[in-house]
Amino acid sequence: MKKLRDNVATRHFNASKFSLERGESTTFDCHADHEMLFVFSGVGEVTYGDGTLSTEQLTPGDMILMPPFAAHLIENTGAQTLVMGNVWWEDRQTIDERVKAPKCERRPRVVLPSFTTPNGRMHLGHLAGPVVAADIFTRAQRTLGFDCYQLCGSLGFQTHVGITAAREGRSYRETSRTYSDDFLANYRLLKIDFDVFATLDELPRFEEIAREFLTALDAGGHLIEKTTRVPYCEHGHGYLFEANVRGLCPHCGEKISSECENCGLFVPDEELVDPVCNHCDRAAAWRPLKRMFVPLEPHRVVLERLLMSGAYVGKMPDFVAKVLQHKLPNIPLGISSSEGVALPFRGQEDLKLYSAVELVPRFLTAQDMLASSTELGSGEVELALFFGSDNAYLRCIIFPILLHLFDASRFHIVGFFANEFYQLDGYKLSTSRGHVIYADDLIRQGIPADWLRLYVCHTRPAVAATSFSLGEAFDWIERRRRRLASVIQIISNAVETHHRGTVPEPGTWERLHRAFYQQLCERRHEGRRLFSVEGFEPRQIAELIDRLLRDLDRFAVESLHSRYHPGIERAACALSLVGLRLWATLGWPVMPELCTAVLARLGSRETPCLNRALQWVPAGRSFDIGGWAA
């Protein structure tokens, strides 16, 4: 893009004039200013919008107004230079209105944590990453009134599972089934509730959907065929892909297998440095192999739109921006493997579907299972993805482009939520090195599932690695369990002593009561923000739950005392129960079993809702804590 003269700036307005040569385009832009665009000469197209994007033709004399936060891209589609001008200015009131009250269509939401690879038992690192966060997000959306569904599974074919199967002397499917059952057992222990969990039992449906997906890519002209060099073991192990080979990353020099955990960038087979066979530990040779590929570069606009929409969270905007500074690669459809879905193309029948491309058929299969069991239908759906940062390229780059090529109109990705590595006592969790701890072991050692979920939420490695310590976890959890038990006991004693075990009508409010009620309103408002797609952050949710419990403890201790006037004491008692109900509502996505029990004792047996004002506990209801255990 070439500027024709210097920008013009005044106190309130800024203006400039620029040109685009034939075939040139701007990058997607999204800012807080109003902007007016003018076309002086030439023709082109402008793609713009907030969420849903539209494309319009540009001809001389056209003017277009862009409101704040509307993403836009301009392209010269003519033979001559496209010359344009623009004026932009700030409107603080409009900015505040759009930030505070973003548009919110009530489409169904589908949450997609990474499908678990069934090559070993599920350890705490898996749970602290995508799994618990995705379950919290799903429940949080339900408290905001959204229809939200969570899909997961172990469906698919990865070479890591094949290596484990060979080592353990079992078939691929036996191995997949064994560890899938372990995953499900751990999920049940931790109250993680999937609407769909897809396994290899769904293989016929998966194969059919995979063929439909590949056929659609081919029919859309999105495939190319070419021959590239591939690592090859000349000592009997053939072509080497994914977990069967190791080498050095060409981008950062890190030792890698199929993906680089250090820089996160995609490594094409032909670019792996110094490849070695993982079966015989000998240097690999290079052999040519003809395969089908999906070129990603023609579809970079998909990523630019998502980047401008704010869908990428945490470190992901910087990661995607870094990727977009370079030409996007061609992604192979197939690899040489004994297990997997055979490619339905002539000359490619011996190759199996590459796991990175498998991501879309896996999701579509789970989505089809969901549609079969619900009234979801075939309307537009919003997606939220949860994954480890080592899978960022697959989820942030490959998946959205492939899904767009298959169905550009139905699925709208609203959030890419990544996590870093969860460590054990300061070192990376590793099953192979025996440095690992399992969720079921922790529960057997006395940590209740709900409190383990809260601690994992509190220590979740969102943007930096964090560490689990058994002693610290026990101490942190025990302090909060005691505080909750104390709060409930104080409230119960007041209800029993002064009101014969039934909830009183609110009485006379004093300054302390008004301040506490205002504090509860602020906590509820903060919860709605943290539960939203735009503000979701599990660690901050855990901090909010903790702060509210401290608020409630302090208020109960200060206000529920016999020295108060009876009317003032009634108000304090009723407000304490309001605070306890709000605590259980905000805590429900994180601690579902415990908070469901608390809400039931307060007279509520429906899904908690944050869209209503603070909820009073009905006067005259008994508040019995017999048999209670926090």
Image (cartoon, rainbow, N blue to C red):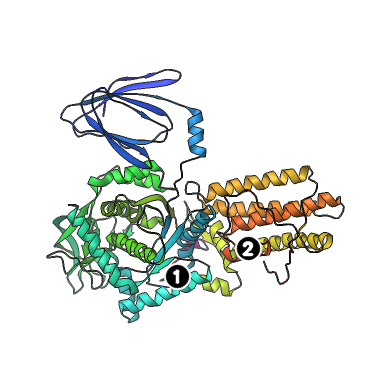
Q: Nearer the viewer, residue 161 or 251?
A: 161
Amino acid of disc 1: Met
**In this rendering, does residue 26 appear at all?**
no
The residue at the point 45 percent across, 64 percent down is: 126
Q: Which residue is mark 1?
A: 122
Q: Quadrant of the C terminus?
A: bottom right
N-term-proximal mark, 1 vs 2: 1
Query: Which portion, as a residue range, is magenta?
Result: 419-437
Whole-percent x, y for residue 200 in the image: 33, 73
The residue wearing badge 2 is 477
Using residue 236 as the reference point, say whether residue 470 is left or right of it.
Answer: right
Please name the predominant secondary structure of the magenta segment in the image.
Answer: loop
Amino acid identity at mark 2: Ile
Residue 601 position within the rendered picture, expressed as x and y whole percent measured from the top left? 68, 64
The residue under the point 36% across, 57% down is 391
Task: Find numbered disc 2 in the image and state the secondary structure of the residue it sits on.
Answer: helix
Q: Residues within 10 Å of mark 2 (few under 14, many from 20)?
A: some
